[in-house]
Amino acid sequence: MQVESFRVFRDLVETRSFSRSASLNNITQSAVSQQLRSIELRLRVPLLERTSKQFALTREGQLLYEASRDIIAHYQRFQHQLEEMRNIISGTIRLVAVPSLLKNFPLVKVQVDYRRANEVYESVADGEADVGLVAFPSPRKGLKVETFKKDTLQVICAPGHPLIKKGTIHLSDLANCKIVSLAPDMPTRQGLDRILAGRGLKFQPKMDFDNVETLKHAVEIDAGVAFLPHSAVAAELAAGKLAALPYHGPEIIRPLGVVSRTSRVLSPAVKRFLKALKAPRSSETKEETKA
């Protein structure tokens, strides 16, 4: 049996999906089925319960899965050790949420995909992505979730908004304003609502949006006032397209988290990326902040 066969079987068991295993290994779904049948013929044992309505392994299948997981881990560790001995940081990082690293590691290819927060965790858990970036990170089984940076949520409005003349406002002043916000199921919205509730405040947004970019454009056309991440509006503030309303009281902090899988061997490229991401930086340029 080849290493690829062990990898395909491991992914099939962990994703419980022939199509997802095929996608992860860049082969067709029929090729996954063929490899499964080939392994069963070679070992002369069934690996899946054919009569079960749900995906279920036989005892032999469970044994092969555990062996496959160990074999792939050892093989990847061997490959990565060779790369580190040669001091070559190359390969591909499958990143969910935010692109980075290209400037520091030109031999590394970064595949970026933007998804909702719950899908970021799922993509990393399923092995579709090596690293995920989320706001207001929360612990998940089988995943390593760490806070690597803190952003601030600012009160943002269109230039010329009446509250600008007031100077520094009280957040309670927003009760008389049209508020636009992210959708209630999004972590940034949920985190913001918790923070505001802790300060005795609760706003009822007039409109909800499912991403920061659309919300930002709504504020630009004066559809309402919004709490937006500083990193997302820095360019528009500098260009005068948006305005920030300073307010009394402590800043509203939005923690940013990095998600990786605990059960997988990380490549040198991913290790370096995570190390660079979590490294403390005494000063950040605006470009770094926007990334």
Image (cartoon, rainbow, N blue to C red):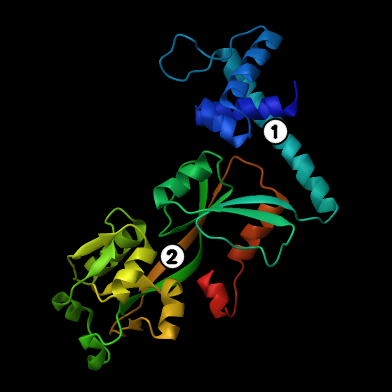
The residue closer to the viewer here, 265 or 246, is 246
Residue 146 picture location, percent across and down? 51, 57
Query: Along the horizontal axis of the image, is 246 left or right of 81?
Result: left
Write down the quadrant of residue 9 in the picture. Answer: top right
Neighbours of disc 2 within 10 Å: few (<14), some (14-19), many (20+): some
Q: Secondary structure at mark 2?
A: strand
The residue closer to the viewer here, 21 or 51, is 21
Which of the marked residues, 1 or 2, is nearer the chain's N terminus? 1
Residue 13 picture location, percent across and down? 55, 26
Count of number-bearing discs: 2
Residue 195's place in the image compared with 54, above or below, is below
Residue 150 picture location, percent across and down? 46, 69
Residue 214 picture location, percent across and down? 35, 64
Query: Along the horizontal axis of the image, is 267 left or right of 96?
Result: right
Which residue is depicted at the point 57% across and 73% down? 288
Which residue is depicted at the point 30% across and 73% down? 219
Instruction: Please tell me the numbered disc located at residue 29.
Output: none
Q: Residue furthest right?
A: 86
Instruction: Please tell me the numbered disc located at residue 72.
Output: 1
Q: Residue furthest left?
A: 176
Q: Which residue is mark 2?
A: 255
Q: Secondary structure at mark 1?
A: helix
Write down the quadrant of residue 227 in the picture. Answer: bottom left
Amino acid residing under circle 1: Ile
Quarter that holds the C terminus: bottom right
Query: Along the horizontal axis of the image, is 210 left or right of 50?
Result: left
Amino acid residing under circle 2: Pro
Neighbours of disc 1 within 10 Å: few (<14), some (14-19), many (20+): some
The residue closer to the viewer here, 31 or 58, is 31
Q: Residue furthest front?
A: 221
The residue closer to the viewer here, 48 or 216, is 216
Residue 189's place in the image compared with 216, above or below, is above
